[in-house]
Amino acid sequence: MKKSVLIMAGGIGERLWPLSRENKPKQFLKIGDNKSLIEKTISRALKITNEENIFIITGIRYKNAFNKYIPNFKEENIIYEPLGRDTAAAVTLGVLTIKERIGNSIIAILPADPIIKEEDLFTKTLEEAVEVTSKTKKTVIIGIKPNRAETGYGYIKLTDNIKDNEFKVERFVEKPNLENAKKFLEDGNYLWNSGMFIWDIESVLEAVKSLMPDTYNKVIEAFNNIRDKEKLHLAKEIFAKIEKISFDMGIMEKLKDIDEVAYVRFASVYRQFQDIQTFMDELKKILE
């Protein structure tokens, strides 16, 4: 089966102000070398598929920024949301677009802005995750081994070890308070939820249709209007009526067949930062 990648690039990065601003959000920041975070994510995606099968979904307000900062990326592979309604709607719109363009595929849904120290390990982890989905049709999420009691991430509690670094998930946990975060760290069976998902496209759409039917129907309606430039205003009006909810909360935490969700452990991703000081502290560690 074909492999595709959907890069989620709609965030403003308000917590990293003044480094991240509306006209240059965090995904365009250059960290450590002359490549921006999103350029690095595109490079990682190219290790599992070809350029034609890599798509970016972002807000329409960032169109000029994309033309300026990554001018060589295929314009037709940038999907512009008519209005930001969080990641459940964004993923659904992105997946519908990819299915129309290339048909069914194994799809890796990746954030645009991770800082990753061990690139070779990450590539190996991503390849393993794609292989698990290809062979078993399971949903795979890459989990991050915590190195501190962090209250800014959601957690994954693991259960059976299937093999090597592949586990089943027992439950999803919302961002904890500090006391519980310390317990999770000591327990050893909890990973940070990276927000990196590997599915097959048909399964993604079936999950949204089953668990968030109103969102599914509205995104379908908006999708049909987006293709007609004269009806773009209608797409925006439809999107405004969509529930604003993350993909994690709207889909992942509601999956009935939780045994069909596998997690592959990965040791070294740095991603969500609570403020500029946390960002700078982590950056120093990564660049050492």
Image (spheres, rainbow, N blue to C red):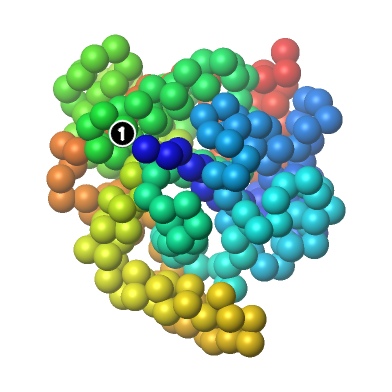
Query: Residue at 72% of width from left, 13% of height from top?
Result: 288
Query: Taking 124 as reference, is 245 above or below it?
Result: below
Residue at x 58%, y 50% (from the top left corner): 55
The count of marks equals: 1
Relative side of 114 to 174, left or right: right
Q: Given the image, on which type of amino acid does mark 1 rest?
A: Thr
Image location (x, y in percent) of residue 81: 58, 67
**Is there any visible trace of residue 197 in the rendered image?**
no
For label 1, the crowd category at 10 Å Cα-Cα, with few meaning under 14, some 14 to 19 and many 20 or more, is some
Identify which residue is drawn at 45% across, 38% down: 3
Would residue 79 be visible to someone looking at this image? yes
The image quadrant where one finds the N terminus is: top left
Name the residue tied to disc 1.
133
The residue sitting at 67% across, 20% down in the picture is 286
85 to the left or right of 39: left
Residue 283, quarter of picture: top right
Which percent across, then down, holds residue 168?
22, 29
- SS for tag 1? helix
Q: Tell whether 177 sits left or right of 40.
A: left
Q: Position of residue 97 (x, y in %)?
A: 49, 61
Left or right: 236 as drawn, with respect to 170 = right
- Indicate whether 279 appears above or below 159: below
Note whether 173 is above or below 183 in the view shown.
Answer: below
Q: Quadrant of residue 272?
A: top right
Q: Please, is residue 164 above or below residue 155 in the view?
A: above
Q: Position of residue 13 (x, y in %)?
A: 66, 51
Q: Nearer the viewer, residue 167 or 204?
A: 204
